[in-house]
Image (cartoon, rainbow, N blue to C red):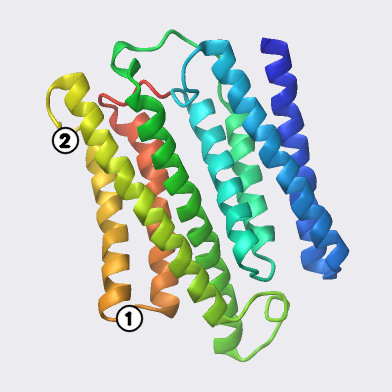
Amino acid sequence: MTQISYLLFQTVLAATFLSCAAYIVFFISRKKEVRTLARWILTLSGILQTCYILSRYWMTGYAPVTSQHETITFFAWASTWAYLSFRWRYTVKNFGTFVSLLIFILLVIAASVSRGTAPLAPALQSPWLPIHAGVSLVAYGFLALAFCGGLMYLLQEKELKTKRFGYFFSRLPSLEALDQLNSHCLTAGFLFLTLGIVTGTLWAHQAWGTYWQWDPKETWSLITWFIYLIQVHQRLTVGWRGKRAAVMAILGFCAVLFTLWGVTFLLGGAHSYAR
């Protein structure tokens, strides 16, 4: 089973690479048939990622979100299906190029860390594990889309501001479309992020008898949640749009990455088991 799981992950990497390469070719050539091929390969990658995550579950007997390899893989899976679900309802020009590249980078990082399994720590032996971790990583998937949209916005805004319509101008969506993308992904991501915080506090109460311990990862999760709360509040009340919203989406995602990795390796704490 271990060998099958290993080969399955290699297939996931190959499919994601091909999808990313096809999206880049489409970005350069703008041939619609290449974009269609890229999207189908990315869908195949999403299916293969699902199969790989299930294979890890069958190997270990518990939700595969307890190691860095499993967490990053699940993050990539969430980003993949967040994009595909978004693409099912909305069309944003060349969005897939940026998202597929991010997904491929995540999977390369997952491939570079240990894929070994270990007995489940006592604190993790709870039905809250898949609920809390799964919801939080789905939130990260949607916030990753907002990050990609923010980067695209800044690239397009720079082209328009300098009035030098270069390589990116004709290949990127309008600023209005990118701002709407930011709004949709931010709303979905913030909703799941809030559910992640709530389920985390319920799990903490079950495991340690207290809803909050101010553990480093708990603290940074709360900081990240406040960063996105500010974005949602300002967008709804004072109409934060455009470049400011794009920059905040990028900064918020940096906080997500620090919460996911930086806290684990730099600050430790009760959540440092996910190495």
Residue 107 horizontal/vertical position (percent):
62, 37
**In the image, what residue occupies the spot 33% across and 74% down?**
235
Q: Which of marks 2 and 1 is in front?
A: 1
How far is disc 2 from disc 1 in space, using C-alphas?
33 Å
- Reading the image, the residue beneath label 1 is 239
Q: Can residue 216 be seen in this view?
A: no
User: In which quarter of the view is residue 237 placed?
Assistant: bottom left
Q: In which quarter of the image is the C terminus?
A: top left
Q: The residue under label 1 is which amino acid type?
A: Gly
Question: Dot 2: what SS?
Answer: loop
Picture layout, residue 19 above or below residue 120: below
**In the image, what residue occupies the spot 58% across and 31% down?**
110
User: In which quarter of the view is residue 168 placed?
Assistant: bottom right
- Reading the image, the residue beneath label 2 is 214
User: In which quarter of the view is residue 234 placed?
Assistant: bottom left
Disc nearer the start of the sequence (2/1):
2
Q: Which mark is residue 209?
A: none
Mark 1 is surrounded, within 10 Å at the Cα level, by few (under 14), some (14 to 19) or many (20 or more) other residues, namely few
Picture layout, residue 11 above or below residue 60: below
Residue 63 horizontal/vertical position (percent):
47, 22
Q: The residue under label 2 is which amino acid type?
A: Trp
Please indicate whether residue 100 sits to the left or right of residue 113 in the image: right
Q: Is residue 66 visible?
A: yes
Residue 11 horizontal/vertical position (percent):
76, 30
Mark 2 is surrounded, within 10 Å at the Cα level, by few (under 14), some (14 to 19) or many (20 or more) other residues, namely few
